[in-house]
Amino acid sequence: FMTKLEDHLEGVINIFHQYSVRVGHFDTLSKGELKQLITRELNTKDKATIDQIFQDLDADKDGQVTFNEFVVLVCKVLKTAHEDIHKE
């Protein structure tokens, strides 16, 4: 039996893998895979924003975003969502 939080955390992992398996290494996101994930899952279509996100996340500049690098984006989105809840 998984708690609600555990279920949501597993969901984040599953979304990452849903996109990471498509091209190249199965456990990293290429720029194209990250673009698809952000466009579909975070409703962001601005190319400049996505390019900046990729550059910011790809800490070791290897052209791939690992899960550890992806978690940085998840944290930013969570913080923003939390702030937005308090603005309503």
Image (cartoon, helix red, strand yellow):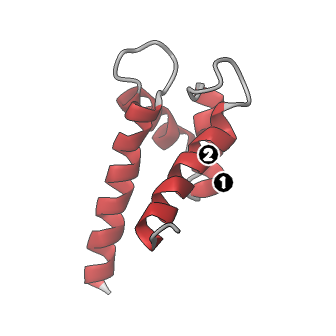
User: Crowding at label 2, few (<14), some or many (≥20) Cα neighbours within 10 Å?
Assistant: some
The answer to which image quadrant residue 23 occupies is top right
* Identity of the residue drawn at 40% across and 14% down: 61
Q: Position of residue 82 (x, y in %)?
A: 30, 71
Q: Is residue 87 above or below residue 32?
A: below
Label 1 belongs to which residue? 40
Tell me: residue 78, above or below residue 33.
below
Residue found at x 25% / y 81%: 86
Q: Residue at x 64, y 19 (%)?
A: 25
The amino acid type of the residue labelled 2 equals Leu
Pick the quarter of the image with the C terminus.
bottom left
Vertical placement of 7 versus 54: above or below?
below
Q: In the current view of this chain or complex, which residue is farthest to the bottom?
A: 88
In depth, the one of 47 and 75 nearer the eye is 75
**Mark 1: secondary structure:** helix
- Three-letter amino acid code at the position of disc 1: Arg
**Image disc number at residue 37:** 2
